[in-house]
Amino acid sequence: MVVAIQLAEIQGVEVHCIESDQRKCAFLRAVARATAAPAHIHAARIETLDPTMLKPVDAVTARALAPLPRLVGLASPWLTRGAIGIFPRGRSEASSTEPFSDASEFQFESLPSKLDRDARIVRVAVADRE
């Protein structure tokens, strides 16, 4: 929702929030209305959402949803269509890319957090196939 609020002034922007908890969805809808945020709230589990029902997606992000390997798996329908993943990993980033093999279809970039010098953000994109 923070991203949607920050992008509210940009014409044509759409942010899709996927949340399975109905109470949280109601809250997100209220915030979107109050802030005129360009947010669409989907009351569903990410595993059950048809990724083709959304327009092309530029980026995927999630906070405290799952360990990175599972998170990349959940986001892969969008990542493989060209979206990038931006995943805050806190201080646990060092071990979070270990489960991926060198043959992974994704490339990972660890970025410093601007809020916590010991925390990291992982950027995920489809690997270059040179």
Image: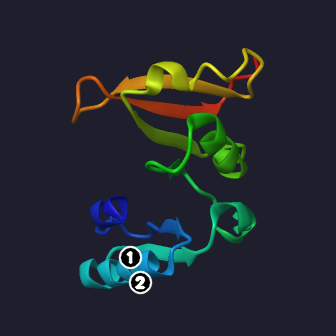
Q: What numbered label is drawn on residue 80?
A: none
Does 15 sit left or right of 28 as displayed? right
Q: CA distance from mark 2 to mark 1?
A: 6 Å
**Figure check: 91 above or below 56:** above
How many circles with numbers are drawn on the protein? 2
Check disc 1 and report the residue beneath it.
28
Check disc 2 and report the residue beneath it.
26
Image location of residue 15, percent across then percent down: 46, 66
* Quarter of the image where one finds residue 27: bottom left
Q: Which kind of residue does numbered mark 2 sit on?
A: Ala
Image location of residue 73, percent across then percent down: 70, 43
**109 and 99: which is toward the camera:** 99
Confirm or deny contact between disc 2 and disc 1 (CB under 8 A): yes
Image location of residue 61, percent across then percent down: 49, 49
Question: Which quarter of the image is occupied by the C terminus?
Answer: top right
Q: Residues within 10 Å of mark 2 (few under 14, many from 20)?
A: few
Image location of residue 44, percent across then percent down: 62, 73
Q: Residues within 10 Å of mark 1 (few under 14, many from 20)?
A: some
**87 and 52: which is toward the camera:** 87
Label 1's element? helix
Does 94 sit left or right of 127 as displayed? left
Residue at 28% across, 68% down:
9
Does any portion of residue 55 appear in the rendered image? Answer: no
Q: Which kind of residue does numbered mark 1 sit on?
A: Leu
Question: Which quarter of the image is occupied by the N terminus?
Answer: bottom left
Does 31 sit left or right of 13 as displayed? left
Residue at 54% across, 26% down:
96
Label 2's element? helix
**Figure check: 74 above or below 121:** below
